[in-house]
Image (spheres, rainbow, N blue to C red):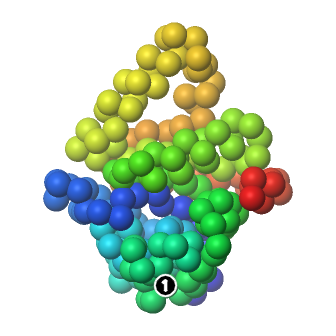
């Protein structure tokens, strides 16, 4: 199958404490596969990462994993990926994930997920890419972060236009459909590799 689009999913290498997190990861993977899409993700088979990859694969989607050598054993690199790229550094991983995706979405996760989300958002702000980015706020997981971001706007460290670069939602079909609709019809060449 030649994928019609490619979505990079940032999420935890752990499952988290709530079953809703796993259900959301399954729903994201199913949606990608059922819509003839491709998942780009961190290449692991544990936690929500493994869940979204398996759900994508089971639904007929294509799976591209990108993982640094240092995490191959720790995150249990997923041999079932259609493509599994083992890279030298986290910088390489993130730049390749960015280049291979048409859009980005963050599911619940830890510090790595936060860092990836903020970096891709920053890269968009700086004009390194023009790809849509979203946050799936499952079970209120990102409520605190969204409140903090609103506080940052109120305190004058961010503007509403920066918040406008991120789409948030609680329902998988609505959020992913909106992100896919925002993918540029004629994307300009991005400059993500400049960050290596």
Horizontally, residue 74 falls left or right of residue 89, namely left
Q: Position of residue 188 (x, y in %)?
A: 82, 53
- Tell me: 93 left or right of 126: left
Vertically, is 52 above or below 60? above
For the C terminus, give its image quadrant: bottom right
Relative vertical location of residue 100 with respect to residue 152 in this rendering, above or below: below
Is any part of residue 175 visible from this angle? Answer: no
Q: Residue furthest front?
A: 70
Q: Is residue 78 above or below residue 95?
A: below
Q: Which residue is mark 1?
A: 81
Residue 95 showing in the rendered view = yes
Residue 14 drawn above or below residue 43: above
Q: Residue at 45% across / 89% down in the picture?
A: 79
Find residue 166 and report its horizontal and vertical position in percent. 54, 38
**Of residues 169 and 84, the one drawn nearer to the viewer in this rendering:** 84
What count of labels does the image hold?
A: 1
Q: Secondary structure at mark 1?
A: loop
Asked where in the image residue 34 lies, by quadrant, the reply is: bottom left
Residue at the image position 29 percent from the left and 63 percent from the top: 14
Residue located at (60% from left, 35% from top): 165
Residue in the picture at 64% in, 73% down: 88
Residue 170 point in image, percent of width and height: 32, 44
Quarter of the rendering containing residue 68: bottom right
Q: Position of residue 112 (x, y in %)?
A: 45, 53
| Drawn side of residue 183 relative to residue 7, left or right | right
């Amino acid at each position: 199958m030649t994928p019609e689009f490619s979505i990079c999913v940032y999420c935890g290498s752990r499952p988290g404490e709530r079953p809703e997190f796993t259900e959301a990861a399954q729903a994201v993977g199913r949606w990608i596969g059922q819509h003839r899409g491709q998942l780009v993700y961190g290449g692991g088979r544990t936690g929500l990462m493994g869940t979204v990859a398996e759900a994508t694969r089971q639904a007929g989607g294509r799976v591209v994993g990108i993982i640094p050598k240092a995490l191959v054993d720790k995150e249990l690199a997923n041999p079932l990926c259609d493509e599994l790229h083992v890279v030298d550094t986290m910088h390489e991983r993130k730049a390749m994930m960015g280049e291979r995706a048409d859009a980005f979405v963050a599911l619940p996760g830890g510090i790595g997920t936060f860092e990836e989300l903020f970096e891709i958002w920053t890269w968009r702000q700086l004009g390194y890419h023009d790809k849509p980015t979203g946050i799936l706020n499952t079970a209120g997981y990102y409520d605190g972060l969204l409140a903090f971001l609103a506080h940052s706007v109120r305190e004058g460290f961010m503007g509403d236009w920066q918040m406008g670069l991120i789409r948030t939602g609680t329902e998988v079909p609505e959020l992913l459909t909106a992100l896919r609709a925002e993918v540029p019809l004629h994307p300009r060449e991005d400059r993500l590799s400049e960050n290596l």
